[in-house]
Amino acid sequence: MKKSLLFLLVPSLLLSSCMLMPSKKTSSDTNTSDNPTSTSTANTSTNTSTDTGTDSSDTESSEDDPPTPPVVTKQTISQIKTDSKIGETVIFDATYLRTLTWTNEDLMYFADANDYIWLRVPYANYTGYLANLYTMKEYTVTGKLAKVNNVFEVQFDSEITNRGSVVTLGETYPLSYNPNNVAINVTGIAEIKAKSGQIILNNKGHGVGEIVKFTSQLVQTEYEDANKKAMVLDSDGNTITVIADEQKMVNKEDIGKYYTWIGIISIKTSIPAIMGLSCEYVSHSSEEEAHINVEAAQEVSPDYFKNWNLTSSKYNPAPNNTYFQLFKSTGYIVDNADITTTYNLGMVSNYGDSLSDAGSTNTVKGFYLVNCTGLDDSELKYCPVKDYFGKNIAVTLYYAIRQYDTANHLWQMFVIESLIETA
């Protein structure tokens, strides 16, 4: 009998309306790195960063006597970007949207009626007070204006401290955030692909871009993670993953429906994704929702991805366009025999091939399947390819890259489960 086993994965959701309710905020499944370019859904979560540092209680003032921020004229975010000088202290009122977590710091995303910016906070200062603030609430933010990779940001000022940097304006204070003004309308995922290719990445392969608004079809959810990750597809066959914060945006039952998504273009270890802020159902006919167009899928063998590797010692990411491509492969379903405590199913090219890395750091000639890893005996029934596991039956899958498993050296793919068929 198999039991659960944790391993490290590197990445790349509601009803008719996907607006998220206010909730306590910490980090989410986003980026892990130093000095990104630019960053990030509203909700409650637990900071999962593994970095260590001084507890925020060592750096913040008591709750009864919060420090007074310096006397600075309050501006809009757009005014700050236009009129303020780099290094100056700036202050503004804005809605807290979500946080992206990097290796040693967190990027807190704020937006007002017409623009957005993030507050870059060292991890040691983010823990505690800042990590427990509610998203989709209004705050007064104070920090130092900076420009990283030609993108404006506000950086945490240790002299102001945690409580002085982000001050709540009250539970009932009206939100300034206007998503229709802040988000950039894009015609489809192809435009997001082009924008992501222009993002300057840091030495960890991380970066962030604009807040965008686009419409696409929901074709799969990652129900292993409470449907907080969704695979979406546009009419031209381009695909990307939308990642909610702690509150899901859609459900498995919504697959096939069309949504207008608002979110932040984010790249983590070379893999693009959309950090979701909200979504709204767009009505289509039942025939359109039942049909998933896969004509643009590129047919490859399961070992097609073997030359790309995201481990630090052999870092060789796939070209950016690859992460937006829909693929089609025919192969055989096997379990990774190296892991004896859980089921971890994937696809290989030939019957009898293995998903074992055999102590090597090279990428395995095959791939894992989302919703089919880390399963115990009682959970195996939820894997959509369980009936073909270990059998000499060729199966055809349509899928896109989701993330890279650095512990077991293979890619994990987001499979459109409704299109699984025997060859």
Image (cartoon, rainbow, N blue to C red):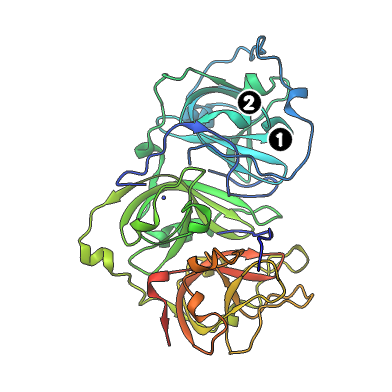
Residue in the image at 51% along x and 43% along y: 246
Looking at the image, residue 154 lies above or below residue 354: above
The answer to whether residue 382 shows anywhere in this view is yes
Residue in the image at 41% along x and 66% along y: 238
Residue 28 position within the rendered picture, expressed as x and y whole percent measured from the top left: 58, 45
In this view of the protein, which residue sits in the foreground, 403 or 388?
Answer: 388
Tell me the quarter of the image containing the C terminus: bottom left
- Mark 2 vs mark 1, CA separation in Å: 13 Å
Name the secondary structure under disc 2.
strand
In this view of the protein, which residue sits in the foreground, 324 or 55?
Answer: 55
Q: Which class describes the residues within 10 Å of circle 2: few (<14), some (14-19), or many (20+)?
A: many
The kind of residue on which mark 1 rests is Pro
Q: Nearer the viewer, mark 2 or mark 1?
A: 1
**Occupied quadrant, residue 216:** bottom left
The kind of residue on which mark 2 rests is Gly
- Return the residue found at the far front: 1
Name the secondary structure under disc 1.
strand
Looking at the image, residue 398 lies above or below residue 17: below
Residue 195 position within the rendered picture, expressed as x and y whole percent measured from the top left: 48, 56
Tag of residue 122: 1
Give the residue number, with chain letter if any, for mark 2. 143
